[in-house]
Amino acid sequence: MSRIGKAPIPLPDKVSVSLNGLAVTLKGPKGELSRTLPEGVQISQDGNTLVVSPSSETRRSRERHGLCRTLVANMVEGVSQGYTRKLEIIGVGYRAAVQGTKLVVSAGYSHQVEMVPPEGVTFAVEGNTTVFVSGANKELVGNEAAKVRAIRPPEPYKGKGIKYEGERILRKAGKTGKK
């Protein structure tokens, strides 16, 4: 049995759960998330906790046990606290701004790059060079942050580009001149 899957998922007071077979719907202050779990697991509510368990002892069931528990735990954390990814823009003339709901990034191209967030994700900019991607769904927030970073990934010589907060960029030595 999965060590991760065995752990019960505590429910905060402000989160309500609706279970319908393998369909899980969670409502909280940060939004509402729903997901249908794959076959091979079962989920039950035991007081103020959710318990995910394998429905049989087949290999497929055991494989999905820990995954499904983690997915549901991420949903609980998302609707109660939310997720945020912070990106830093480094480079002369590189900046970002929010216009309405769109994120507009100037990153050294001949044009500005506009990004429209999917439903449930918001962009915020602090000081023209720090971008916050937030939302209740961990998967969506991570994917949108990766799309923003892909506009201009950091390059190894000067470190210019868009990087995650705390990301280390391996630097290379440039050319050496003739002597």
Image (cartoon, rainbow, N blue to C red):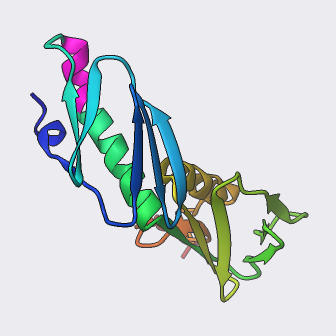
Residue 107 is situated, as x and y percent measured from the top left of the image, at 76, 68
Q: Main secondary structure of the magenta part?
A: helix
| Depth order, front residue of 167/154 | 167
Give the magenta-colored segment's residue range.
59-65
Classify residue 19 by image quadrant. Answer: top left
Residue 153 is situated, as x and y percent measured from the top left of the image, at 61, 59
Question: Is 136 above or below relative to 60?
Answer: below
Classify residue 170 by image quadrant. Answer: bottom left
Query: Is residue 61 a member of the stretch shown in magenta?
Result: yes
Residue drawn 82% across the image and 61% down it: 113
Residue 138 is situated, as x and y percent measured from the top left of the image, at 47, 53
| Depth order, front residue of 6/29 | 29
Count of numbered badges drawn on the protein: 0
Residue that extends furthest to the bottom in the rendered view of this protein: 127
| Depth order, front residue of 162/123 | 123
Question: Is residue 21 rendered to the left or right of residue 58?
Answer: right
Question: Is 163 above or below relative to 41?
Answer: below
Residue drawn 64% across the image and 52% down it: 147
| Depth order, front residue of 41/12 | 12
Classify residue 62 by image quadrant. Answer: top left
Residue 56 is situated, as x and y percent measured from the top left of the image, at 17, 14
Question: Is 4 above or below relative to 128?
Answer: above
Question: Is residue 96 rendered to the left or right of residue 150?
Answer: right
Residue that extends furthest to the front in the rendered view of this protein: 47
Q: Quadrant of the N terminus?
A: top left
Residue drawn 29% across the image and 57% down it: 11
Residue drawn 25% across the image and 14% down it: 60
Residue that extends furthest to the top in the rendered view of this protein: 58
Q: Is residue 24 visible?
A: yes
Q: Quadrant of the C terminus?
A: bottom right
Q: Is residue 175 visible?
A: no
